[in-house]
Image (cartoon, helix red, strand yellow):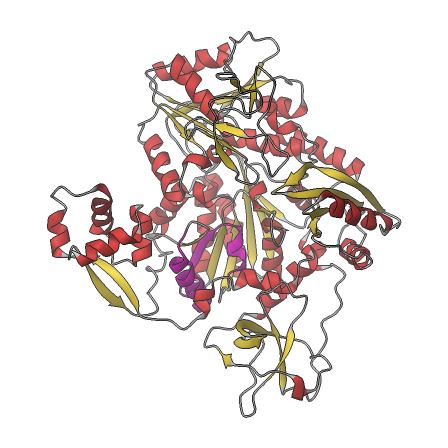
Amino acid sequence: MPDSDASSPADICDCGEAARPESRPGAACSVRVLLPLPLPAALDYLVPEGAVSPEPGSFVRVPLGTRSLVGVVWEGTGGELPAGRLRPLLEILPLPQLRPELRRFVERVAAYTMAPLGMVLRMTMGVAAALEPSRTRRLCALASAGCAALGTHLPPARKRVLETLRNRPPLAVAELARLAECGPGVVRDLVRRGLLEERFAPPEPPMSPAPDWRLSGSPLSPDQAAAARPLVDHVCAGGFRATVLDGVTGSGKTETYFAALAAALAAGKQALVLLPEIALGAQWLERFRNRFGVLPAQWHSDISQAERRDTWRAVADGRARVVVGARSALFLPFAELGLIIVDEEHDSSYKQEDGVIYQARDMAVLRASLAQIPIILVSATPSLETVVNVARARYERVVLPRRHGAAELPAVRLVDMRRERIEPARFLAPPLVAELAATFEAGQQALLFLNRRGYAPLTLCRACGHRFQCPSCTAWLVEHRFTRRLLCHHCGHAEPVPPFCPECLAAGALVPCGPGVERLLEEVTARFPAARAALMVSDLLSGPRAAAQLAQAMTERRYDLLIGTQIVAKGHHFPMLTLVGVVDADLGLTGGDLRAAERTYQLLHQVGGRAGRAEHKGQVLIQTFMPDQPVMQALAAGDRDRFLEAEAAARRHAGLPPFGRLAALIVSAADSETCDFTARALSRAAPQLPGVTVLGPAPAPLAILRGRHRQRFLVKATREARLQAILRDWLSRVRIAGSARIQVDIDPYSFL
């Protein structure tokens, strides 16, 4: 019996699901087909007479109502309907079968997250075009006339298209338009003019050459070599093994786990690398290319549908040997998966908050355990769940205690904002201003971190006090001065900044309250007009390509200062960056989030780790109104382990994860009456069991989100409680009225 004090793959697998039934004798004339729809189970279909019964995992086309859909043949016995009432399969598709471990993974994820089985399957086969027969592709190549036209005067959009193709192979119209940042019509017009020529390609494009594991990468330091040795041994031995690669920022963790990745490739296996935000992966991709000669296959929201189709097929066929992607890459149908790596495993971006709600780090461990392959969890600030699993000997741990080469960890200094005198409408304390001046004088670079997008978090009228609020959410609109718009960061609502107050019609009375990164840029520009500063925020970056260009410009010292939100906190290596300033460091410590202290420590430690990563020594200044807070003291002392011990003790005492279990139930409806009615019905039926406490209902902090009214329950239970079974029984006894919906979040990260 596993220890009950911490989460583990066994905890995720053991969700109170009934055992899978065995196939019935004589049921060969029908098969169970799971469809990518919000269905709890597979449906029965008849195998046409004379046809070979498809094996479990086969992709088939079936009728459903007036439509035909693609599904997957699933194990299990059929229902009680006679064969005469079953509809026949339409087609067995010539696609690789879903492997047994992936089908088990789909079932376990559905059981743990309490999501419909069909919706989890949908994540594995969400690229509809990949399931259709391949067609000859029409590509565009640079014609000789186009080469000649490059030296002439052309409209900017046309010139970008030709420049994009100058050193590239032929591309599809949509992909070429995306890369050139223009419309498809511009590309087609160049074809008509003869500057581009159309070519036809085979239906299955060859993937780029496989990564070459025989290439020698950068020499590993003694610390790196010692850490890489057990990682490589686990890959060579096979079998499930979870290992935590725990290294300080700048210690060379990436090059260390590249050794394990090379071992997987040498063994003929595929590898999956998860990154929390693929937009942060530009420098990672360049390191991969330097080590293995080519880029890996990529999987994230910014790639085109054609790329998604080609990558999905290449993964299923085994042609894509290494995939780097966001959390959804975990559900790709790998043919020969031999290694999973979760980089920055602590990052909260691995938590999926919409649709099927899951924690990708935990589900990656589950997939590795089902496939019986090793997994490596990488971080400079491991999550408390991971730390506890190491302490319970469920995970192994290898350590990189020092920075690579001659680099040293930066000195951390707290700036007590209670004692600093700051000019009105300014937000940088004098010590930070002085260090910025010294850094620029020395020809070095600095970074300012504020985890708040836009110009100001609140805009109000000083004449009548009116505050701008989102019409669809209980949230303030955030001013973005560069785009002259007020935005809701929850639903995306946007409206122009008005010239007068809409409440009292006073002109010139609107004032910003509090700082955002745009306001910091304004202050720095006023203080240091000669400094070249840039913003690195998701609002202003169109995708990974734009992030890569900005990171490259910083590396090439085209900027002296980078100002950004959490997108700057991880994954970047700027050799001349020696100063990091954190503004409003206490921002993440409010809001009632049980992980607030842990996440604040991780974020500030990571952003501070950008300083002094080469030969120049770095320093970090943290502006805080709570210098005595344990998070701030731990950062100043560089004592991560003591902080984690105190955090673990507090959570253990409170029975909170990873020492207890939590689930959130979010009731939402189009009107408040329906929402309240459903919440009261749930409250009356709430379970009253030993070791289980139900808190609520209570209005959610965001009581209205995207136009829907919301109430929340929080269920707290011991580790021994079979939480999913309890929740299923509870929900089965409640009738859902009208437009109401109930969303279940196992182990919630967001409490909004």
Horizontally, is 359 left or right of 425 in the view?
Answer: right
Question: Which residue sits furthest front?
Answer: 505
Name the quadrant of the N terminus. Answer: bottom right
Whether residue 752 is situated above or below residue 692 in the rendered picture: above
Q: Position of residue 734 (x, y in %)?
A: 81, 56
The answer to which of 741 and 305 lies nearer the viewer is 741
Name the quadrant of the C terminus. Answer: top right
Q: Position of residue 353 (x, y in %)?
A: 61, 47
Residue 320 visible somewhere in the drawing: no
Q: Quadrant of residue 483?
A: top left
Q: Residue at x 48, y 16 (%)?
A: 508
Whether residue 616 is situated above or below residue 109 in the rendered picture: above
Q: Position of residue 311 (x, y in %)?
A: 41, 61
Q: Quadrant of residue 573?
A: top left
What span is in magenta?
303-332
How many circles with numbers are drawn on the protein? 0
Q: Residue at x 58, y 54 (%)?
A: 364
Please check the rendered image and state whether residue 717 is part of the magenta-colored stretch, yes or no. Answer: no
Residue 303 visible somewhere in the drawing: yes
Q: Residue at x 60, y 82 (%)?
A: 87
Q: Position of residue 330 (x, y in %)?
A: 54, 56
Question: Which residue sits furthest bottom?
Answer: 50
Q: Main secondary structure of the magenta part?
A: helix
The answer to which of 595 and 200 lies nearer the viewer is 200
The answer to which of 528 and 660 lies nearer the viewer is 528
Whether residue 656 is situated above or below residue 435 in the rendered picture: below
Q: Residue at x 50, y 21 (%)?
A: 500
